[in-house]
Image (cartoon, helix red, strand yellow):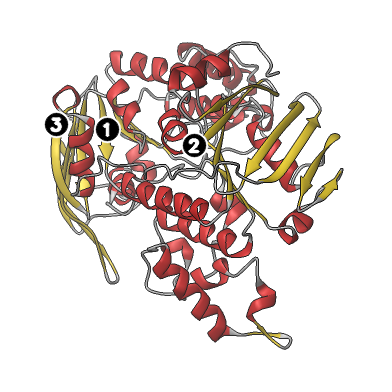
Amino acid sequence: MLAVAGIHKSFPGVQALAGVDLDVRAGEIHALVGENGAGKSTLTKIIAGVQSAETGEIRLDGQVVHWQGPAQAKAAGIHVIYQEFVLFPHMSIAENVFLGRMPRNRLGMLDHRLAERRAAEILARLGVSLDVRQPVSGLTVADQQMVEIAKAMIDTPKVLILDEPTAVIAGREVELLFDRLRKLRDDGVAIVYISHRLEEIFQLCDRLTVIKDGRWIATRSVSGVTRDELITLMVGRDLSHLFPPHERPPAAPEVVLAAKDIRLGTRVRGCSIELQSGIITGLAGMVGSGRSELAMAIFGGLPMEGGTVTLAGETFRTMTPERAIGLGIGFVTEDRKGQGLAMLQTVGANITAAILGSVRKGPFLDAERERQLAERDIDSYQIACRGAATPVATMSGGNQQKVLIARWARACRRVLILDEPTRGVDVGARTEIYRIMRSLATEGVAILMISSELPEVVGMSDRVYVMREGIITGLLESGTITEEAVMDLATHDRQAA
């Protein structure tokens, strides 16, 4: 269906692609994998007509094509669903599905009823039942994703490319997405699936192509490669020890923070947790269980309706981010681009954003001091960049995440909350983030890690609280933390004593 051969693309000072090949058959789900910076996004944009290649060719249905823009590629049947949705929140589902292609009646006027009927039919084929007249702002992330897929289904797509489609969903929502993708595959659609979650590739995909540093490495049948072999192909080195060894915890670790009976309406219903010095505490549960809301309440990002937070000998019934930071709590958000990083600023400005008082010279910013502190963290956290003056927008997701962790690790030395610390991060960068987390814990920082990935929860946590529908259903201590135990607590209606 789609064949890409010998694609070269360079940007000033960077060879993004150097002779990449990719062939995707009709009726298959083909994984495109590689570390951040490998060239996956550039290749996708070239296939979709957003960018043009310097050399090489693209064939669709055996014919060489030269796109003049993304509209032409889309008209030919190539559709891309990006990790960040392109939806207008205050417009209806039907209006978003037919954006720019609204049907018209015989008088040439927009035919909203026809659009609503056809949008409902398309969603029904995907197994989704929604009121297409409601605005997308009221939809769950999973349903927004279905709206994006519906946009591609107006004209039956030949090639559907999905970039990290499960980055913002988990559990049953992932299973439903996979069922719908398999249905499209069985209907003859060629699907390119981009993901850093290797377990998904083995669960869903038929074949895979690995690219590294802009070069084609291998194309294999998924059934013919092991997880360890795939990791080695992606990063060029053995990462069998993905998770650093657990340090022996102190006999009686100090309780640094105690949150008691935290309440946030129906989202968090009387939850109590303790964070200990030098201990990585996991907070697990399905998406929507209240994990992020509980963490945000502790940090002051959401106002508590009840409960207390005790830290440094003081008990607080109200918390604000300013107070939390002053008490030594840092928060690495799951949305690093929207809520975490200042994307138009440099590495240095982002790392020192929470400690501006220490990089001042009178009323002015001490640029040299900022550079020195940033360069120190660039070395410590092995951040791949050209120095403190590098704009973070030009960096890979893994390195952006390390910048965010460096900021809060420097500013807050008591408690560090990490919400989905490796979301959208490649395998190589994950090992570095895990190393940083374990190193901070060894230095005595109490870490709370929220994660939707069970291998990460099991591999990194010294103890794990599990949530379901706003309550804590259990606490797993070292030696009892298994994927089966976490899932049992996450899916059964019981409350911890």
In the image: residue 436, left or right of residue 338: left
Q: Which residue is mark 2?
A: 461
Residue 402, x across and y down, in percent: 46, 57
Query: Which of pointers 2 and 3 lies earlier in the amino acid sequence?
Result: 3
Neighbourhood count class around disc 1 (C-alpha, 10 Å): few under 14, some 14–19, many 20 upward: many
- What residue is drawn where x is 27% and y is 54%? 52
Report the Cα–Cα distance between label 2 and label 3.
Answer: 34 Å
Residue 170, x across and y down, in percent: 50, 26
The answer to whether residue 143 is visible is yes
The answer to which of 291 and 191 lies nearer the viewer is 291
Specify the quadrant of the image occupied by residue 51: bottom left
Is label 1 in a helix, a strand or a loop?
A: strand
- Please tell me whether residue 428 is drawn above or below residue 142 in the rendered image: below
Q: Which residue is mark 3?
A: 220
Residue 124, x across and y down, in percent: 51, 11
The amino acid sitting under disc 1 is Ala
The amino acid sitting under disc 3 is Arg
- What residue is drawn where x is 47% and y is 36%? 167
In the image: residue 415, left or right of residue 462: right
The amino acid sitting under disc 2 is Ser
- What residue is drawn where x is 60% and y is 42%? 252
Query: Which of pointers 2 and 1 lies earlier in the amino acid sequence?
Result: 1
